[in-house]
């Protein structure tokens, strides 16, 4: 034979050696890839850590904002509740006070339109006058104040103009006469004073 044939046993050994070498190469390549994945560059690792830090900061900021908003809401609710309680205390007597005003008006009219020269009526009028003063003192203790703007400037917030009278003696918009007193309860208007207001006299 011109070509020398190999021993079958040698051929098997050669194939096994080749297979082993291929396996070793594949294992080395896989190990190198895994090592490359595990070992990142310092720059990449810093960038990843920085991203995680920023995400943590944002989470903390969001949580802090939520806590601040919740605290503000609670504070607003507490403040509104306190205001409601205060208003309830201040104005709980509003209806009751309004019911008393006509009684005071009638007592004052009794004094105003009575015959003050009649000696027999004087003790009665003095008693009525003392009753009116007692009424006013009693309601004042609960925040009810009289609005009697005689000679003052007209104030539409507390006065109701019933008529307008030309006058050269006072400046325009001065209260010339009070037809019915007004009242307030802790600064809130219960009833406006009914008044006559001046205006400039015609030339």
Image: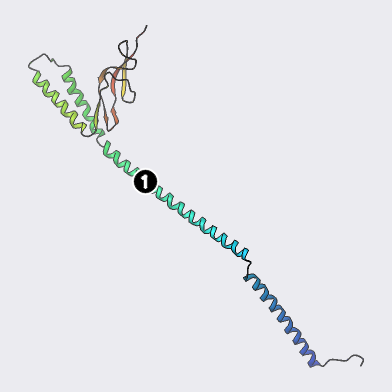
Which of the 4 quarters of the picture holds residue 32?
A: bottom right
| Residue 50 image position (x, y, % from top left) | 57, 60
Q: Quadrant of the N terminus?
A: bottom right
Asked if residue 159 lies left or right of residue 130, the reply is right
Which of the 4 quarters of the picture holds residue 188?
A: top left
Rendered residue at 11%/22% (across/down): 126
The answer to whether 152 is drawn above or below residue 190 in the figure is above
| Residue 119 image position (x, y, % from top left) | 8, 15
| Residue 39 image position (x, y, % from top left) | 63, 70
Which of the 4 quarters of the picture holds residue 125?
A: top left
Q: Quadrant of the C terminus?
A: top left
The answer to whether 164 is drawn above or below residue 139 in the figure is above
Q: Under tag 1, what secondary structure? A: helix
Rendered residue at 29%/40% (across/down): 86
Asked if residue 45 lies left or right of residue 119, the reply is right
Scheme by which the image is coloured:
rainbow
| Residue 6 image position (x, y, % from top left) | 84, 91
The answer to whether 55 is drawn above or below residue 82 in the figure is below
Asked if residue 110 lies left or right of residue 153, the reply is left
Rendered residue at 14%/23% (across/down): 129
Of 160 and 62, nearer the camera is 62
């Amino acid at each position: 034979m011109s070509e020398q044939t190999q021993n079958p046993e040698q051929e098997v050994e050669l194939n096994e050696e080749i297979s082993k070498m291929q396996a070793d190469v594949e294992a080395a390549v896989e190990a190198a890839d895994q090592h490359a994945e595990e070992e990142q560059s310092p720059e990449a690792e810093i960038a990843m850590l920085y991203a995680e830090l920023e995400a943590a900061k944002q989470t903390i900021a969001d949580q802090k904002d939520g806590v601040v908003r919740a605290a503000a809401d609670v504070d607003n609710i507490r403040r509104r509740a306190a205001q409601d309680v205060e208003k309830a205390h201040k104005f709980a007597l509003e209806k009751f006070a309004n019911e008393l005003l006509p009684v005071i008006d009638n007592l004052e009219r009794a004094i105003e339109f009575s015959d003050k020269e009649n000696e027999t009526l004087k003790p009665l009028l003095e008693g009525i006058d003392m009753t009116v003063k007692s009424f006013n003192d009693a309601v004042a203790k609960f925040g009810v104040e009289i609005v009697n703007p005689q000679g003052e400037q007209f104030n539409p917030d507390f006065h109701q103009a019933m008529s307008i009278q030309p006058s050269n003696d006072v400046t325009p918009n001065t209260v010339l006469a009070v037809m019915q007193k007004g009242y307030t309860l802790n600064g809130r208007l219960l009833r406006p004073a009914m008044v006559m207001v001046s205006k400039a006299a015609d030339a």
